[in-house]
Image: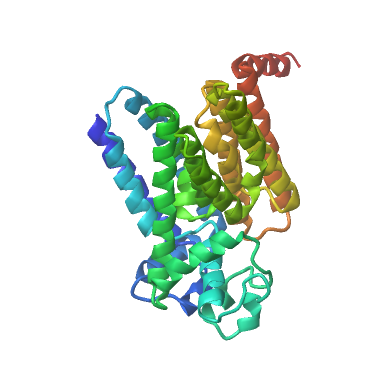
Amino acid sequence: MTRIYYFTFITVCILLVFYSYGLVDPGLKLVGSRHFFLIQEVVKPWFFPNGKTAALFYLLFISLLYIFSFIFLRLLSKSKVHFKKILIILFLLCLFTFPAFSNDLFGYLAYAKILVFYHESPYTALGMDFAGDPLLKFWHWSHLPAQYGPFWIVLSSFPFLLSFGNFLIGYLNFKLLSLGFYLLAVRLIYKLSADNRMDAFYFALSPLIIIDILIDGHNDIVMMGLALLAFYLFKKKKILLSLIFFSLSVATKYSTFLLLPVFCYFFYCRYRQKRISWSMVWNLSALLMTVAFLIASARYEIYSRYFIWPLTFISLGKNQQIKTAATVFSGGLLLRFAPFLYYGDWGGNTPYIKNIITLAAAAAGFLFIIGKPVEIFRLVGKLVKHK
């Protein structure tokens, strides 16, 4: 039976790879290799101009990822599957899928190119200033300066340098960077949870993590990986290194600055020679990162990748109801992309449908937190039936 699950999951991942290339922006041909993206010519007619089909398959893949996440978590808890085999499958998925649901990875390439190739600061120079560059022309946020921290700008220059000016190599380098920090985060969650495999599995197999990190390659995993490393080093009493990596985390994307009260608590316990309550640390960190998620969502847009911030620490918590609620809510955040696929633009009915989905997911998550979703649904059903 386990082999059937492996085979089916591999099949789903292969189909997801093909699907991702069906959503490639035609502008990518300006910078891409026709040989590498030959698959695009085959699958693009199925999805790119056909919003209903693209949205339907997106919903199907999201549903399947959640189903397999649930199945593998159950099997892993009984030691009936090998996590390393699943990681190998996810590694190949990460490597070969196109970042179909976001073009931020190309923004990372663009900022790095502005710094390394044009010798300009991404904080002052805009992508639109280099109109003749095909990569910067393709990038959708070329009218804005860099919004990331200085450490990320410096770090992102290395994948670009190692590409030797080749777009495909640079693209794969950023994919590998995301994968590396994903593996680091999974390992650190395992170590910080006192070798609790299920906490690490919960994070690693989350469809939100698979979509936003392994497929789209967002740099949020770098920020959270460095934050986890800072916690791990403090737990090992390597205080200076812990503060250095915490600073690097903040200098990646700023949001982890809100974890500063946790470090104040660390030093308070150290000064008073009190034992650190790590369960409280994870709950407080999850709460602070939820605040960061709400602030970023209010300032910009409700992006699913922002929820990676609290989800990282929720994974370390022991409250299963909160974990279930986070799973439900993260699913709703991923579904926000479906209306765009269906209608083909971000205007019209898309914003309203996205907000309805988000509110519904938040409400469902709240029901799981209070622990009585089934009873409430039954009550609503009886009221509807009575009317």
Q: Is residue 249 left or right of residue 232?
A: right
Which residue does the image show at 56% across and 29% down from the upper left? 282
Residue 225 in the image: x percent, y percent? 49, 46
Image quarter for residue 382?
top right
| Colouring rule applied to residues | rainbow
Frontmost residue, 49 versus 336 = 336
Total marks drawn? 0
Residue 297 appears in the picture as rendered: yes
Q: Is residue 381 above or below residue 201?
A: above
For the C terminus, the image quarter is: top right
Residue at 58% x, 29% y: name it.
270
Which residue appears farthest toward the bottom when viewing the image? 132
Q: Position of residue 9 (x, y in %)?
A: 33, 41
- 186 w.r.t. 112: above or below: above
Depicted 267 relative to depicted 246: above or below: above
- The N terminus sits in image quarter: top left
Camera sees residue 208: no
Lateral position of residue 267 relative to residue 8, left or right? right
Percent of width and height locating residue 252: 57, 55
Q: Position of residue 277 (x, y in %)?
A: 56, 22
